[in-house]
Image (spheres, rainbow, N blue to C red):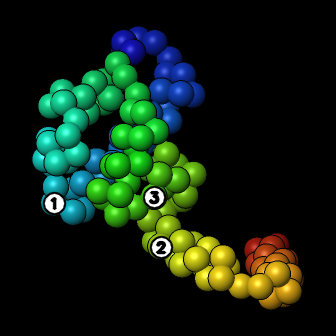
Amino acid sequence: MNQNSNPTPASLNLLEMISRIDQVLREQKKTASKMSRELGFSSGLYSQWKQGKQSPSADRLYKIAVYLGTSVDYLVGLEPDKESVGLRREIMQTLNELPPQSLEKVRDFVLFIAAQSEKNTRN
């Protein structure tokens, strides 16, 4: 992608993803080269992603998320913040253990909370 071209939606997503990976690496005081080495990626692969020459495969993206202790959803921008990743994961694990009748109660409660939240934002 040259500097004069308008970025496509796909390249914007790639840029956001690389930005999030870089941010988590900085927070964890790790480097991209150390991550690449420990995950068995070639030394220049991450640079090619940053330059928009290649995109990571789903398998590599998953490995990066595990390595960084976050989710693929967070890295690709589907999850708004890292803090909610762990909480959502914990909720999902708990939900998976509930019987169907309890799930219906949880659904009703979640819908109630969502309605209250929407009501509060309008006021």
* Residue 117 tag number: none
Classify mark 3: residues with Cα within 10 Å, few (<14), some (14-19) or many (20+).
Answer: many
| Residue pictured at 79% horizontal, 76% vertical | 114
Residue with the mark numbered 1: 29
- Residue 39 screen position, x and y as percent: 22, 45
- Residue 95 screen position, x and y as percent: 67, 79
Q: In which quarter of the image is the C terminus?
A: bottom right
Of residues 13 and 92, the one nearer the viewer is 92
Tell me the SS state at disc 3.
loop
Residue with the mark numbered 2: 86
- Residue 83 screen position, x and y as percent: 45, 71
Picture quarter containing residue 47? top left
Tell me the SS state at disc 1.
loop
On screen, residue 121 above or below 72: below
Which amino acid is tagged 1?
Answer: Lys
Picture quarter containing residue 112? bottom right
Residue with the mark numbered 3: 71
Is any atom of residue 10 visible in this view? yes
| Residue pictured at 28% horizontal, 47% vertical | 22
